[in-house]
Image: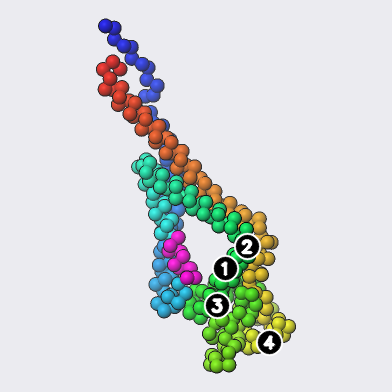
Amino acid sequence: MARRPRAPAAYGEDFSFVSPLVKYLLFFFNMLFWVISMVMVAVGIYARLMKHAEAALACLAVDPAILLIVVGVLMFLLTFCGCIGSLRENICLLQTFSLCLTIVFLLQLAAGILGFVFSDKARGKVNEIINNAIVHYRDDLDLQNLIDFGQKKFGCCGGISYKDWSLNMYFNCSEDNPSRERCSVPYSCCLPIPNQAVINTMCGQGMQALDYLEASKIIYTNGCIDRLVNWIHSNLFVLGGVALGLAIPQLVGILLSMILMSQIKDQIKLQLYNQQHRADPWY
């Protein structure tokens, strides 16, 4: 009986379908965002611990520190799967990373589309968030600084108008309010005075008691929602660039993980093929 001729080997013993470029590019890509996520969590925890407990509980829903911690933890877990999956060539971890990243991308895309389609509802939600922030203005220093920055940056006061500050217990205009800031607005609502050496933090005293015409001589009377909408309309190209900048790393991560998974599957098939033919006495 004639011996079956040995088939020529298509690939050498050291051949691998897995590209080191793709593998380590995905690893360092995830490593970068892994480090960023740890920094985010550390900053969030530090900011949280520096606050008073009662103030933290009062404005939990709008606390930037909590948001930073949650986003950081989710990013940490996601990039951990990407790092270990690429380094160990683990298909399960890579699939988890790719699936989660795809879900995050689709959620961001859906949020953008829904925000555009249901702009009125989005506007109402923003107004609700701003009103809630006004209520807790004096309860949280970070929130107070954020509101003051926003009002000075956009030249506005309150959500819809400067009288929204009556929602805050210290600025409320009711006659039984014993606060010294009764019927006032924060100093960040005041019109800037050229060459002012010292900021007058009491410049908003009693402004809510004035009508729009009189108050507009001293403070911003327009609400921040309208100012924010106008700013978005005038900076659509910038916002589009930012959105694209956020989307590109996610798409790159999804693409690299899918390429690497395909290469690993091909490598597994090659290994099984070689094992079968080593066991074949006629090979």
The answer to whether the residue labelled 3 contacts the one labelled 4, judged by CB atoms less than 8 Å apart, is no
Label 4: how many Cα within 10 Å (few below 14, some 14–19, many 20+): few
Q: Which residue is identified by label 2? A: 119
Residue 215: image x %, image y %? 69, 84
**Element on which disc 1 rests:** helix
Left or right, 121 with respect to 33, comes to right
Q: Which mark is on residue 210?
A: 4
Q: Residue at x 65, y 77 (%)?
A: 161
3D distance between C-alphas at marks 3 and 4: 20 Å
**Disc 4 marks which amino acid?**
Leu
The range drawn in magenta is 61-71
Left or right, 159 with respect to 29, comes to right
Q: Which residue is identified by label 3? A: 134
Residue 78: image x %, image y %? 42, 52
**Disc 1 marks which amino acid?**
Lys
Q: Is residue 70 magenta?
A: yes
Q: Residue at x 30, y 26 (%)?
A: 275
3D distance between C-alphas at marks 2 and 4: 32 Å
Q: Judge whether residue 159 can be spotted in this image.
A: yes
- Give 228 or 34, whichever is nearer the viewer: 228
